[in-house]
Image (cartoon, helix red, strand yellow):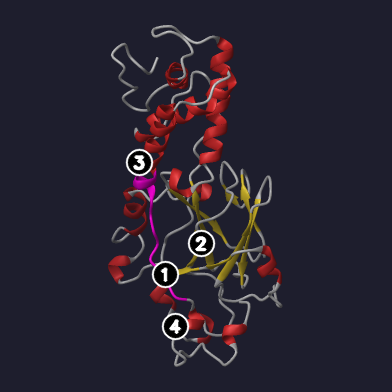
Amino acid sequence: MSGSLNGAPDPVQGYRVTDLVNMALRQIGVGALGTTASDADLFDGVMQINMLLAQWQRKRWLVPNLVDRVCEASGKSVYYVGPGCDFNVPVRPDQIETAYVRLNVGGSYAVDGDFANGDYEPVDYETSRVVPVGGAYLGDFSPAFFGNDFDIGSDGLSDGVQPIDYPLTIIPSYEDYTSIGLKALETWPSMAHYNPAWPAGEFRPWPIPATGRWELHIVYKQPLGANLTIDSVINLPPEYWDAIMWTLAARLAPSYGQEASPTVVANAKAALSTIRSSNTQVPTLGMPAILTPVSTPFYWPGLERQAL
């Protein structure tokens, strides 16, 4: 049992699903203090928590962590995202928050503007770093991620050498992606589209990165785990326990022929507001390239009218 007699949660993970369901039911007058809900009540409560977490999973401000997942480019135009796919993730994400590519070293280069034409010295980009087993960097942006990946000496940094990342502009819709005329163009990647197909999403970088040269990275919301059972423990930050309990009470109230009281609704909103303030991350505002001064070497008249 995770909740002890003094009400303390499990010191490592938190409260059991059973604890939170019983507490939620008491907020709407189901079950006397000190009693346990029936099996049917608990079963409904578990299903409601799973459905609740599945909904929260799609809201960036309710997810406490982002995950960086990597896949080595192999010259394909489409990379699949899901269990056992190119991007091996436990649950196919509904969308990606951002994406970038990392220049690999030691591959074969055969396009203008790269190492083969003598524009850059290959030694400037040499690194012994390889894609980890499973394609993930410890699953998140933890300090250990940066410590292992960029330690002096581990990637040749003691010689002034380090990997270089390039952001990918996200193409917001498949309709925009279809407007690209030459989809088979293979050169330096600069954009990407993610189609949240089921059961595996489809990640399309453009232009297509060549084999042996690039790593593809996607950043998505970490799954909250909507497959809990009656004996599961809510393994989320402490502020989520209160939010789950009060929100669950509001969701369960109609099943017992009543409306959630103003107190229940107010506490649920307050708990969710706390999570929102804790998780909110506002990226720095950037200006589109076409709005930069005309003196940029990548500008030509009419560029602002192009779809991409």
User: Which of label 2 and label 1 is nearer to you?
Assistant: 2
Mark 1, residue position: 164
**Disc 2 secondary structure class:** strand
- Whether residue 93 is visible: yes
**Screen quadrant of the N terminus:** top left
Q: Pointer 2: residues within 10 angstroms few (<14), some, or many (20+)?
A: many
Amino acid beneath label 1: Ile
Contact (Cβ within 8 Å) of mark 3 with mark 2? no
Q: From mark 4 to mark 2, how far is it between C-alphas?
A: 25 Å
Q: Give the class, few, some or many, for how many residues have Cα within 10 Å of label 3's Cα (few <14, many ≥20).
A: some
Q: CA distance from mark 3 to mark 1?
A: 37 Å
Residue nearest the observer in this picture, 224 or 33: 33
Dot 2 and dot 1 residues touching (CB under 8 Å): no
Q: Assign the magenta stretch its main secondary structure.
A: loop
Disc ID at residue 99? 2
Q: Is residue 177 left or right of residue 287?
A: right
> Which mark is nearer the camera, 4 or 3?
3
Residue at 42% over, 46% down? 65
Q: Residue 205, image x and y in percent?
A: 60, 66
Counting from the top left corner in percent of width and height, residue 98 is at: 50, 60
Marks 4 & 2, CB-CB < 8 Å contact: no
Mark 2 / mark 1, whichever is N-terminal: 2
Alpha carbon separation for disc pair 4 and 1: 14 Å
Looking at the image, is mark 4 or mark 2 earlier in the sequence? 2
